[in-house]
Image (cartoon, grey):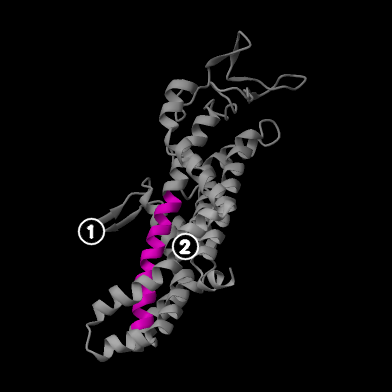
Amino acid sequence: MAGRKLLRDRAAMISLAVLVIIALLCAAAPWYAAHIAHTNPFRSNLSGTVMRHGKPVEVLGAANNPLHLGIEPIGPSWRLGPYMLGADQQGRDVAARLLYGGGNSLIISFAAAAVCLVLAAITGILAGFFGGWVDRVISWLLDALWAFPVFLLAISLSVVLIAHGIDLGLFRLDASSLALPITIIGVIYVPYVARPVRGLVMGLRQSDYVLAAIGIGAPAWRILWFDILPNVISALVVFAPLIIALDLLTEAALSFLSIGVQPPAASWGTIIHDGESLIYTRPMVAIAPGLAIVITVLALNILGDGLRDALDPRAKLRN
């Protein structure tokens, strides 16, 4: 029933289609770079040339000012081919980097959301079901995380860990690994999902079918797996697009500050950082990834609203 209702939601379906198209375009980044852009988007091209209107044009030419002082990257051609969106200060193809960076941004945001939802489900279910000292300990840990502003906590963790990574003996994350921002971003949003899950489980704990299962001596793991978890999954599904959108914005902010995705890898945030100094002469370097972030976050929020309406029993009754 929820699936049929979601399929009838035109805005949600359009948003889902937009997200699929963005993901497919980002997945095609290697093919685009090799067969259309004919360039390596991670290698500087300071002295290269490209054909424009039948003439060779320098990728990095003299600045357009009366004295022609300084170097200015080539502008967009708006045609499918090399340097469709122009070049950055190192002569790299912006369109190719946009697709590669989008792939990393999506991987980080989706993986961080998965980490967040799994940890939030485990902590919220345990705290809400068992109560007592288990609830007090978990709630204290969640409150400790919640006490910090999200971006301040993310920046602090990134600054501390970006130099040396995480080394816990058998478990190690290098600073250049995408797993490091995934872990940081995934952990900082756990309290924002675990708290609602805890409240939902506390209500389910008092429901008749759970009390009946406890009364007949059913083991706790069975009640959690068969009675509690299925009722929590719908809430986690609704949370998923919203957490992905928050993770995408957080990753872009950290990468813009150079404490997220590390070179030679790229993300939409790092490309915006690359275009900061070109905002007046070659604004597309920063505008293109900014628009990609806006479109993706907007689509995720609309899809989240559609999932909420489809999975909300009260919405079903109203319709």
303 vs 209, left or right, is: right
In the image, residue 75 sits, relative to residue 229, either above or below, namely above
Mark sitting on residue 136: none
Q: Please state the extent of the stretch shown in magenta in the rendering.
A: 108-129
Instruction: Determine which residue is flagged by label 1.
Output: 169
Task: Find numbered disc 2 in the image and state the secondary structure of the residue it sits on.
Answer: helix
In the image, residue 273 sits, relative to residue 318, either above or below, namely above
Q: Magenta: predominant secondary structure element?
A: helix
Query: Residue 216 at what x, y percent from top left?
Result: 23, 89
- Is residue 263 something that shows in the picture? yes
Query: Residue 226 at what x, y percent from top left?
Result: 29, 74
Q: Is residue 318 covered in magenta?
A: no
**Between 138 and 92, the one nearer to me in the picture:** 138
Instruction: Determine which residue is flagged by label 2.
Output: 2
**Between 20 and 54, the one nearer to me in the picture:** 20
Q: Is the N terminus in the top left, top right, bottom left or bottom right quadrant? A: bottom left
Amino acid type of the residue that numbered disc 2 sits on in the rendered structure: Ala
Task: Find numbered disc 1 in the image and state the secondary structure of the residue it sits on.
Answer: loop
In the image, residue 68 sits, relative to residue 259, either above or below, namely above
**Between 278 and 269, the one nearer to me in the picture:** 269
Amino acid type of the residue that numbered disc 1 sits on in the rendered structure: Gly
Q: Earlier in the sequence, mark 2 or mark 1?
A: 2
